[in-house]
Amino acid sequence: MRQINRHPTPGARLMLILLPFVLVIAAWLIGSAIRLEANPQDKLLPGLGQMIDAVHRMAFVADKRSGDYLFWTDTLVSLARLLVGLGIAALLGLCFGIASGVFPMLRAPLSTFMTVISMVPPLAILPVLFIVFGLDELSKVMLIVIGVTPMLARDLEQRAREIPVEILIKAQTLGASSWTLVLRVVLPQLLSRLLVSLRLMLGAAWLFLISAEAISATAGLGYRIFLVRRYMAMDVILPYVVWITLLAWLMDLGLRYLNRKWFPWSTGAQS
């Protein structure tokens, strides 16, 4: 049998899914044990017990100065920034995608402009955002918006242009106005693609957030990671990185679930 036609059984599939994670954890445990045996004060690869103690200290022991549970405070602050930024980016990306994908008169100025804007490295203009919007929350949210919106708009524009012309003609024949056409024909097609695009942009959105928090913040997951790095506190950094990864994965699962629930007919919901 050709390898391309072989499919794992449910049990084998679960084992194959877990295998890379098991190998990574095993390599870390072995490396940590070797380094700690040679130097018990080594901070590069902390042991499991050290990281559990660090998580307990950050998550379940109130900070003496502020009285906050730093782990949960950082999580809530970062998630608030991320969700606001993604929400604004999704709304703007959807509007620009529909405008440039459906209306030829708007496509001429918007399509090329959004293409050029999407090529600007968002991190390169981070100092500009701090100057224009200040060092508070707005600049961090705007970095996510500027980094994500152009890519969403371009993807949704392409999806709108892929809608068969016959469908648009039939709708107009039945008396649909431009507004009705957008709401009843184009929008349902693009909402499913929007959820897929947001899934693909989650990694970039987290990158922009962590970068902004590392430079100017007083709370947040990125702020905490770059704060403790000066002490080489890998027992704090590694759990924070794992937690960020877990949050991003859960958000991806949530978007995938919503796509399947709201748009079961879409090919994007099956991805």
Image: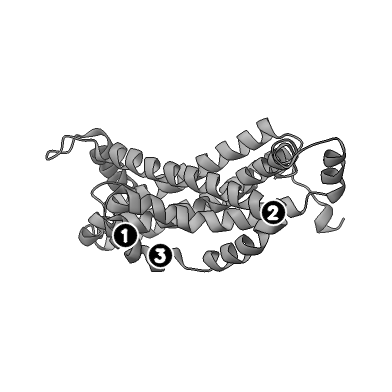
- Indicate whether 112 appears above or below 80: below
Give how far across and how far down residue 18 sits, in percent. Answer: 58, 46
**Which is more toward the observer, 237 or 112?**
112
Q: Helix, strand or loop at disc 3?
A: helix
Disc 1 packing (10 Å; few <14; some 14–19; many ≥20)? few
Give how far across and how far down residue 244 sits, in percent. Answer: 41, 47
Q: Nearer the viewer, mark 2 or mark 3?
A: 2
Q: Residue at x 51, y 50 (%)?
A: 202
Disc 2 packing (10 Å; few <14; some 14–19; many ≥20)? many
The image's colour scheme reads one colour
- Residue beneath label 1, please? 132
Quarter of the rendering containing residue 106:
bottom right
- Residue beneath label 3, please? 123
Q: Earlier in the sequence, mark 2 or mark 3?
A: 2
- Indicate whether 231 appears above or below 12: below
Q: What amino acid does circle 2 point to?
A: Gly
Give the CA separation, mark 2 to mark 3.
28 Å
The answer to whether residue 137 is left or right of residue 3 is: left
Q: Earlier in the sequence, mark 1 or mark 3?
A: 3
Residue 235 visible within the image:
no
- Residue beneath label 2, please? 101
Q: Residue furthest left?
A: 65
Q: Residue at x 43, y 57 (%)?
A: 207
- Indicate whether 56 appears above or below 220: above
Q: What amino acid does circle 3 point to?
A: Leu
Q: Residue at x 31, y 55 (%)?
A: 133
Q: Earlier in the sequence, mark 1 or mark 2?
A: 2
- Which image quarter is the C terminus in? top right
Give how far across and how far down residue 267 sits, in percent. Answer: 75, 44
Give the CA separation, mark 1 to mark 3.
15 Å
Are the residues flagged by discs 1 and 3 in contact, CB closer than 8 Å? no
